[in-house]
Image: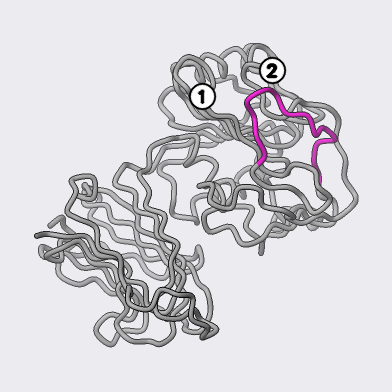
Amino acid sequence: MRRLLLTIYLALCWTFVSNAQAPNVMILAADNQTWANEVKAKLQATGLLGTIDLVDATTTTPTVAQMQTYKAILTWSDNGYANGTTLGNNLASYVDGGGGLVVAVFANASIPLSGNINTSAYQVLVPAGQTQGAMLTMGTVLQPSHPIMLGVTSFNGGTSTYKSTSTTLTSGSYRIANYSNGDPLIMAKDNVGPMNAKRVDLNFFPPSTDSRGDFWQASSSGARIMANALLYVGGSATALHFNGWGNTNPSGSNVGISTYDYISVADNGTMDLGNTYTIESWVYLDDNANNTIIDKGDYRYLFQTHPNGQQGLGLYNPSMGWVYSAGTVPTQQWCHVAVTFDANAGKVVFYLNGNVLSTHTSGISLQ
């Protein structure tokens, strides 16, 4: 029988496999465009999204048709929108058609969206004023298994921590994570409009300390939160979320699963990845031996750390053989590893902790 194997070596491991085209995203920023470009670059660096286009919302109001070419939209404001009412009406129509929306400060605070999108049927956090000046971090995570929390380890709002003064959510909305003072940080609303679209509200200003020193700390997980939110509302990924130990945990204490060092899943067509896919995982490696993250039976695709004596990552399929990354994947510490495969573009990209290890364009093909 052909099978899918996920092997976990002395590690707690979360693996995300997407067999869909990464969603194309519009950034609709009524903001300093240099800062907006920093946000775009951070989202691109996650490797989780498709094409990301930036629109200056202080001068341009996209039509519904233009919006509908994207699976998800991220919008925030620091200045007024060019035409807030028309934009808000267009965004409502976009969501009614199934489009995913992520809204961040100050568009859900002191410079809110207008028009139909600014009604309770579409809102998550009810806009109010803004507050800043007290550094806050991520506090209680109310839904740690929520897809938006995948790979999120921390959030530091910076010395100013720009956020909404509101703590009021509309009916059907829910909190995913709070700030350290108990105010909402990440919120969502599912089943919005006739197409059951999703909206996420982020209670922080998207540019980081790489744009200005008092913004959210770029060393924390703000970019991953935004990317995960766009993936979630874009609704284009199929995920496996494994949470299990091998023989022992990294500290050496037995957790009661003494024999299952891998998870075996019967062959299933949903695991036949297409021309483009992303595989990612959090791993804690006990050693630098050949460690398998995921193996589709008969090696139709195989993703490993330290493959065949290499120090980094490796991806294999029968058509192209092995592709090895540059760099080194460390042991005895948590790290995030990922690979993107695009047969159409003939490209494989490996990532470690959100940074590109290497890009490969020679001999890339689908099995």
Q: Nearer the viewer, mark 2 or mark 1?
A: 1
Image quadrant of residue 74?
Answer: top right
Task: Check disc 2 and give the amino acid type.
Answer: Asn
In the picture, measured across the screen, residue 67 lies left or right of residue 4, that is right
Quick check: 312 above or below 115?
Answer: below
Q: Position of residue 40 (x, y in %)?
A: 56, 46
Q: How many marks overall? A: 2
Task: Check disc 1 and give the amino acid type.
Answer: Asn
Of labels 2 and 1, earlier in sequence is: 2
Q: Residue at horizontal 51%, vertical 20%?
A: 95
Which quadrant does the N terminus fall into? bottom left
Quick check: 339 above or below 306?
Answer: above
What are the residue bounds of the magenta stretch?
162-175
Q: Position of residue 10 (x, y in %)?
A: 42, 79
Quick check: 39 above or below 91?
Answer: below
Q: Residue at horizontal 65%, vertical 38%?
A: 187
Q: Position of residue 133 (x, y in %)?
A: 90, 50
Q: Position of residue 249 (x, y in %)?
A: 49, 78
Which residue is more in the foreground, 216 or 188?
A: 188
Report the residue marked by disc 2. Answer: 118
Q: Residue at horizontal 43%, vertical 30%?
A: 70
Q: Secondary structure at mark 2?
A: helix
Report the residue marked by disc 1. Answer: 191
Q: Residue at horizontal 15%, vertical 61%?
A: 300
Q: Secondary structure at mark 1?
A: strand
